[in-house]
Image (cartoon, rainbow, N blue to C red):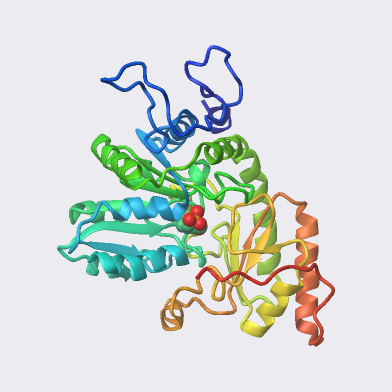
Amino acid sequence: MKFATRLLNFDACPGDPYRPVATPIYQTATFEQERADGFGPYDYSRSGNPTRSVVEEQLARLENASRAFCFASGLAAITAVTRLLASGEEILAGDDLYGGSYRLFSRILSRTGIGVRYADACNLTAFRDAFTPATKLVYIESPTNPLLRIADIPALAELAHRHGALLCVDNSAMSPYLQNPLDLDADIVLHSATKYLCGHSDVTAGVVAVSDPELAEQIYFLQNGEGSALGPFDSYLLLRGLKTLKLRLDCQQRNAQYVAEFLASHPLVQKVHYPGLASHPGHALHATQARGAGAVISFETGSYEFSRRFVEAVKLFHITVSFGSVNSSISLPGCMSHASIPAEVRAARSLALDLVRLSIGIEDESDLVADLASAFEYASSGTAAAPAVRTRGPVVDLD
Ligand SMILES: *Cc1c(COP(=O)(O)O)cnc(C)c1O
């Protein structure tokens, strides 16, 4: 079956005598047992819940995994993966990562005695040199966030396995529709389901999916033992969002290509980062391991002040730290989602303050481009007063 069919073709409620088409929300903490000396299929919602089981099984199928586990957020999912390591062991992470992952690794994991090294996962020679005998987990994103650089996933899997380490790929920017890291030999695929999987900016959720049954048991043990599983209502929302994943992403990706080409031809844009552009250095590599470029674009203007005025002038894009929603959004990663990365580290990774990130939604593409065009005009006009845009609260820093 093709992906669009697989998104809809699953048992919404195994064993239910009424055959509901939508999965019921089992909003219960406990399940009564028939016997005092044994458990039925469910006993307590931290350990297992029927609504969560349906979405976990569906996600496992979509990622070609044996099992998938849903967590309260992407970071809760990442935390569970890091728990596979013991004190004294190390993570080797790509150096262009979601800011929250960087904060977890650098400021929280360091307290537990787990070491973290960073290296450029898009440069295999540099990355190979960063392994140590203590490296047990390789953690990467491809495309990276926010620079949309491409890492060679099968080559990194081979490198990790040769050093006795597991490869975990954060697949949030692609979703299983566009990329299946387990098929590329990764051991663990991870999602911030808050992004494309849910798709509507109304849930935070995370997913860990694996093929190896023993690894699956370990992840389940952590999910239950640490109490970080996704609740029934959020599981329901995730399942509901998932059904339109292809429909949304097809539209978002088409719009993104249109916007990226507009930006690439705009005189006030210095550089566009989007793997769907033939000029992108990772364009060919990405095409060997993914089925589309996604809908996140970043670009540089050469001036922080210009970028800030630009971001504040757009009207159709919400200023938010997230991406992957049906609504288009815009951010300055250097001041928002990646603000938790120290300035000198940001500079070393060419994560400049003028970098603008767009997440393209399902609006009409000509309206999006017209909005961007008028924001460029405003930002370059030198007018002191801000235009009459919408009202909104303060920009929320990730910290
Ligand atoms: C948002 C994001 C996360 C964190 O997910 P939350 O659901 O916000 O906890 C992790 N990785 C990537 C690539 C993300 O974009």
Please indicate whether residue 166 sits to the left or right of residue 392 in the image. Answer: left
Whether residue 15 is visible = yes
Query: Picture coordinates of residue 63 (x, y %)?
Result: 43, 38
Residue name at image x 29 percent, y 70 percent: 126
Query: Picture coordinates of residue 163 (x, y %)?
Result: 18, 56
Extreme residue in the right direction: 388
Residue 100 sits in which quadrant?
A: bottom left
Query: Picture coordinates of residue 191 (x, y %)?
Result: 46, 49
Please indicate whether residue 262 sits to the left or right of residue 292 in the image. Answer: right
Against 141, is 217 above or below?
above
The one nearer the camera, 68 or 50, is 50
Against 234, is 24 above or below?
above
Extreme residue in the top direction: 17
Residue 123 sits in which quadrant?
A: bottom left
Q: How many marks?
A: 0
Against 12, is 383 above or below?
below
Extreme residue in the left direction: 133
Residue name at image x 47 percent, y 78 percent: 350
The one nearer the camera, 364 or 61, is 61
Whether residue 120 is visible = no
Please indicate whether residue 196 sits to the left or right of residue 106 in the image. Answer: right
Against 164, is 331 above or below?
below
The one nearer the camera, 62 or 107, is 107
Residue name at image x 51 percent, y 36 percent: 232
Please indicate whether residue 314 sits to the left or right of residue 274 in the image. Answer: right
Query: Picture coordinates of residue 291 (x, y %)?
Result: 51, 45
